[in-house]
């Protein structure tokens, strides 16, 4: 049986929120089978659980935000991407503020934390959402066109194309493909950082956003070049970060996907629209598990290797 996974022991992290600049503590705890991933706002007078699912997403401006009543957690996509990359099904996340810490701007620190805690299998079948029909969302036309698509595939692969007219981005790969079955998430995707332009950072800060952002947790560019002294971690780091984000956004559906995702200039909002379009069409998917691990897609039975 291909089994669900959780942590072996708890682990903790401390950092600041990218937009709030607020100090925040995370405690990542093991969870029982079929719990899913649940954030718990422990800083509130009465702790509030916020289960991760597509309909709990309440805001997709600049990041993915989930809510339960008035309780919110912002910027969950990098941590969710790490969970997707490592195949974690069940996790309780205590958080002391309303934004997940940005750490180094990628999912690598979360991968390290989760692997350090240890990943164990549980006595319950891992359930996948398997695409049976193609689902697509589109917006705009011509130069403003953007789209995202999920299609049937025995496994999970993603391709993403960006389009930024900037010398530093033009010099890098603007299209990336990645297959999770390769087992190379930690090495090929996890270290890709979020990125932005100095002019946008200044504008966001004037509106009380990006208060925790800087060269230590993002790729920052002026009009012609990357300002980070150490340059890029990958030649195509910009497009790889969009794959990282998409993996986190799509894992919000609550189960791993068996699908081929492809997108052009998509973002958090369109990724969530794609999930909602999928769930609104019960003919387009089925929930499956694998009694025999050999029938599962290549690479899915192995726990991702440590660094």
Image (spheres, grey):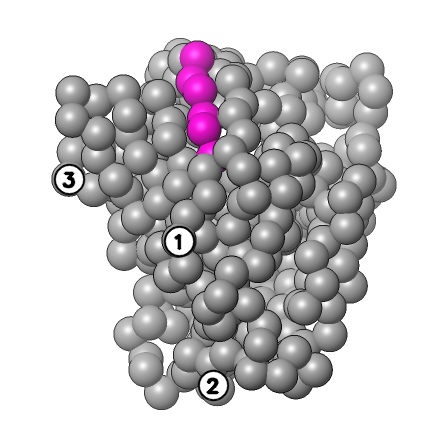
Residue in view at x 61 percent, y 48 percent: 119
- Can I make out residue 8 in this image? yes
| 3D distance between C-alphas at marks 1 and 3 | 24 Å
**Does the CB distance between marks 2 and 3 fall below 8 Å?**
no
Q: Position of residue 20 (x, y in %)?
A: 40, 17
Q: Secondary structure at mark 1?
A: loop
The disc at residue 133 is 2
Q: Residues within 10 Å of mark 3 (few under 14, many from 20)?
A: few
Q: Secondary structure at mark 2?
A: loop
Q: Secondary structure at mark 3?
A: loop
The magenta segment: 23-28
Q: Residue tagged by mark 1?
A: 32
Residue in view at x 48 percent, y 56 percent: 89
| Residue at the limit of the structure toward the front, as seen here | 123
Q: Position of residue 225 (x, y in %)?
A: 77, 24
| 3D distance between C-alphas at marks 2 and 3 | 34 Å
Asked if 43 appears above or below 143 in the picture, the reply is above
């Amino acid at each position: 049986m291909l089994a669900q996974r959780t942590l072996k022991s708890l682990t903790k992290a401390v950092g600041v929120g990218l937009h709030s600049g607020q100090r925040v503590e995370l405690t990542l705890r093991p969870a029982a089978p079929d719990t899913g991933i649940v954030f718990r706002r422990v800083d509130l007078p009465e702790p509030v659980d916020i289960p991760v699912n597509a309909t709990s997403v309440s805001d997709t401006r600049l990041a993915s935000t989930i809510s339960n009543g008035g309780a919110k957690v912002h910027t969950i996509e990098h941590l969710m991407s790490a969970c997707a990359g490592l195949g974690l099904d069940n996790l309780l996340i205590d958080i002391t503020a309303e934004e997940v810490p940005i750490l180094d701007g990628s999912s690598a620190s979360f991968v390290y934390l989760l692997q350090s805690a240890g990943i164990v299998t549980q006595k319950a079948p891992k359930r996948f959402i398997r695409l049976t029909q193609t689902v697509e969302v589109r917006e705009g036309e011509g130069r403003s066109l953007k789209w995202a698509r999920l299609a049937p595939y025995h496994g999970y692969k993603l391709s993403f194309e960006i389009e930024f007219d900037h010398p530093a981005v033009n010099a890098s790969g603007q299209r990336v493909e990645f297959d999770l079955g390769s087992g190379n998430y930690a090495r090929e995707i996890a270290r890709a950082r979020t990125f932005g332009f100095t002019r946008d950072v200044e504008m966001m800060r004037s509106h009380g956003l990006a208060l925790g952002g800087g060269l230590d947790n993002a790729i920052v560019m002026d009009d012609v070049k990357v300002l980070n002294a150490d340059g890029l971690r990958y030649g195509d780091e910009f497009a790889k970060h969009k794959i990282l984000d998409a993996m986190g956004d799509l894992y919000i559906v609550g189960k791993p996907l068996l699908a081929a995702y492809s997108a052009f200039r998509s973002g958090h909002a369109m990724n969530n629209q794609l999930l909602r379009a999928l769930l609104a069409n019960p003919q387009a998917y089925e929930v499956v598990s694998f009694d025999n691990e050999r029938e599962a897609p290549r690479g899915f039975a192995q726990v991702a290797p440590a660094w």
